[in-house]
């Protein structure tokens, strides 16, 4: 849930209010579905739900959340620089604004009818009221739109989480079951009510129990419904009008950008060049998403460079790292104020059409490098099949310790391997890495005991365990690109493993892993200057991997 508190207050408020409303919708739909079993279950479910929603505090929270969520959506619409957006986002907007138009009628004939005319707005009342009318279809559409809108919102929020991606099929199935269950309950109970109402005395008793509105009350409800409907239409129209007024005003303070071998656009000042490209639908590569973590959005400034401030230290360092030519800038870092002509270094076909996995995803993860000691000398003169047999026995012994801890092997490297621990957060990744290292040590001891019984010499290992930012992505030709990881942290883990040999230990753990796992910084850390790694890395030497420190459990 840590991602919930990232970003500005409006984003957090939208997520929190959306989660609250989706929880309410889930409980409401499950309540309707109980009509599939019996009217008593349906009424009892509503009574339980209304303990929360019909008390003063619950009502204030519910309607405040509803107004806040709708208001934030209107505000996002107003402040957008363009109405161009991805298809999923467009569907989200369309559903989001269709919901109030349909929901206001539902509220009018239930909550308002209850407060103004003392109608007993039980589930049965509404089902009897709308069954066989056009409202039955509109309320069915409302149910489906509300649930789809919520599911899209959840997916857009959680799609970057590994556990969400791995369980997409299961979650989709559960998501489909909820509206199906609700509609089955609605149809079953509505048909039952229509049948029992065929008896005139029963029908009159039922209407009396609901305090069913008469013609005068219905006239009042129709007027209230129309007022609310057109009131929201007016609010939505006003938001659109403000949006276009702001865009018109922005054009007066806009800047002209010409792309060589591309279009010429006009964009509002204050945006980065990359944001201008995206708003105008201009193809502009940016694998890190405009965070300044790569240089794939770089451009050559062919005219207008003198009007830009010099590169920041971070931008200059990134450009120097890739040997960029003079005049190159990062589109995600510059904010044009004057007309400019630019050449995009990478345009079209450069992975822009691939999936998100190809683009790469940056995350702080624990990485484990393992190498078998003395493998070359040990296998000199052996037959190839015997070498393969030894390696497979060794990997069969130690790799389960990695997978049991929540890790996975990224690649095998001859007599060793690279493992990563792609868990929910940084702390659990570090904990999983420590668990795997200790598990490998125990598995190695058991493996060597077997070798000793066979009269063979024991196997020695070196392990480097580090934590840092890595980029996960599909690297290779399209259609033949395995998912792997790259980054300075990978190199650091490899260099730590290499240092285990001269230090005569099985395991070196970086301080970053220990701190992320919540362990107290030990006094016997060793500062290491590793080849190809900037700065000094403090690491804990562990003579036997089985004795790796374990993180405290929550």
Image (spheres, rainbow, N blue to C red):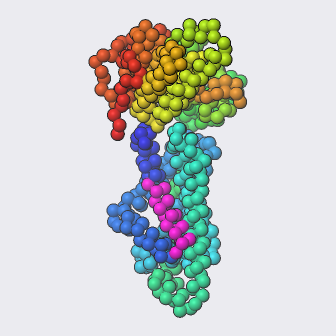
Res 440 visible: no
Does residue 479 lie above or below 53 as drawn?
above
Return the residue nearer the eye: 278 or 128: 128
Residue at image location 63% in from the left, 45% down from the top = 87
Residue at image location 63% in from the left, 76% down from the top = 132
Image quarter of the C terminus:
top left
Side (left or right) of 140 relative to 228: right
**Where is residue 272 shown, x and y percent of the image?**
53, 29
Side (left or right) of 272 relative to 522: right
Does residue 142 lie above or below 130 as drawn?
above
Res 143 visible: yes
Instruction: Residue 418: say if magenta.
Output: no
Image quarter of the N terminus:
top left
Residue at image location 47% in from the left, 62% down from the top = 27
**Where is residue 473 shown, x and y percent of the image?**
59, 28
Residue at image location 49% in from the left, 34% down from the top = 404
Side (left or right) of 544 relative to 179: left
Return the residue nearer the eye: 498 or 140: 498
Looking at this view, name the residue that lies furthest to the left.
523
**Where is residue 359 shown, x and y percent of the image?**
60, 29
Looking at this view, name the residue that lies furthest to the bottom.
201
Does residue 384 lie above or below 272 as drawn?
above
Return the residue nearer the eye: 296 or 394: 394
**Where is residue 339 shown, x and y percent of the image?**
59, 25
Q: Main secondary structure of the magenta part?
A: helix
Return the residue nearer the eye: 433 or 255: 433
Does residue 120 lie above or below 300 as drawn?
below
Q: State the count of labels.
A: 0
Identify the magenta region.
20-38
């Amino acid at each position: 849930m840590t991602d919930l508190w990232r970003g500005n207050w409006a984003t957090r408020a939208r997520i929190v209010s959306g989660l609250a409303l989706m929880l309410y919708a889930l409980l409401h739909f499950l309540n309707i579905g109980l009509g599939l079993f019996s009217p008593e279950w349906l009424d009892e479910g509503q009574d339980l739900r209304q303990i929360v929603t019909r008390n003063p505090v619950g009502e204030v929270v519910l309607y405040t959340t509803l107004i806040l969520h709708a208001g934030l959506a209107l505000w996002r619409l107003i402040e957008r620089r363009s109405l161009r957006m991805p298809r999923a986002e467009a569907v989200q907007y369309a559903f989001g604004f269709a919901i109030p138009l349909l929901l206001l009628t539902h509220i009018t004939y239930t909550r308002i009818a209850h407060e103004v005319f003392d109608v007993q707005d039980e589930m049965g009342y509404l089902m009897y009221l709308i069954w066989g009318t056009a409202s039955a279809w509109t309320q069915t559409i409302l149910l489906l739109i509300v649930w789809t809108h919520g599911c899209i919102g959840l997916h857009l929020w959680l799609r970057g989480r590994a556990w969400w991606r791995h369980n997409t099929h299961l979650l989709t199935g559960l998501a489909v079951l909820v509206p199906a269950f609700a509609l089955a309950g609605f149809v079953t109970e509505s048909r039952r009510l229509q049948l029992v109402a065929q008896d005139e005395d029963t029908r009159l008793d039922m209407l009396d129990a609901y305090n069913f509105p008469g013609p005068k009350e219905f006239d009042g409800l129709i007027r209230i419904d129309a007022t609310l409907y057109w009131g929201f239409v007016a609010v939505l129209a006003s938001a659109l009008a403000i949006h276009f007024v702001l865009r018109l005003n922005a054009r007066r303070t806009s800047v002209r950008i010409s792309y060589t071998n591309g279009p010429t656009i006009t964009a509002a000042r204050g945006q980065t060049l990359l944001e201008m490209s995206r708003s105008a639908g201009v193809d502009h590569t940016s694998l890190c998403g405009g965070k300044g973590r790569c240089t794939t959005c770089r451009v050559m400034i062919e005219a207008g460079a003198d009007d830009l401030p010099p590169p920041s230290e971070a931008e200059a360092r990134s450009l120097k790292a890739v040997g960029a030519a003079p005049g190159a800038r990062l589109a995600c870092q510059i904010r044009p104020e004057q007309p400019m002509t630019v050449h995009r270094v990478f345009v079209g076909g450069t992975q822009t059409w691939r999936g998100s996995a190809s683009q790469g995803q940056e995350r702080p993860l624990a990485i484990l490098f393992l190498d078998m000691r003395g493998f070359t000398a040990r296998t000199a003169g052996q037959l190839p099949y015997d070498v393969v047999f030894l390696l497979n026995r060794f990997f069969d012994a130690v790799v389960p310790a990695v997978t049991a801890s929540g890790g996975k092997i990224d690649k095998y490297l001859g007599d060793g391997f690279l493992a990563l621990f792609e868990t929910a957060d940084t702390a659990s990744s570090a904990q999983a890495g420590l668990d795997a290292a200790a598990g490998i040590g125990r598995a190695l001891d058991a493996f060597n005991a077997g070798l000793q019984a066979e009269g063979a010499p024991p196997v020695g290992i070196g392990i480097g365990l580090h934590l840092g930012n890595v980029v996960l992505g599909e690297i290779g030709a399209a259609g033949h690109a395995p998912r792997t990881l790259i980054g300075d942290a990978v190199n650091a883990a490899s260099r730590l493993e290499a240092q285990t040999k001269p230090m005569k230990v099985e395991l070196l753990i970086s301080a970053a892993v220990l701190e992320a796992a919540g362990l107290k910084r030990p006094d016997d850390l060793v500062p290491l200057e590793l080849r190809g790694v900037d700065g000094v890395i403090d690491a804990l030497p562990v003579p036997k991997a089985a004795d790796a420190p374990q993180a405290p459990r929550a």
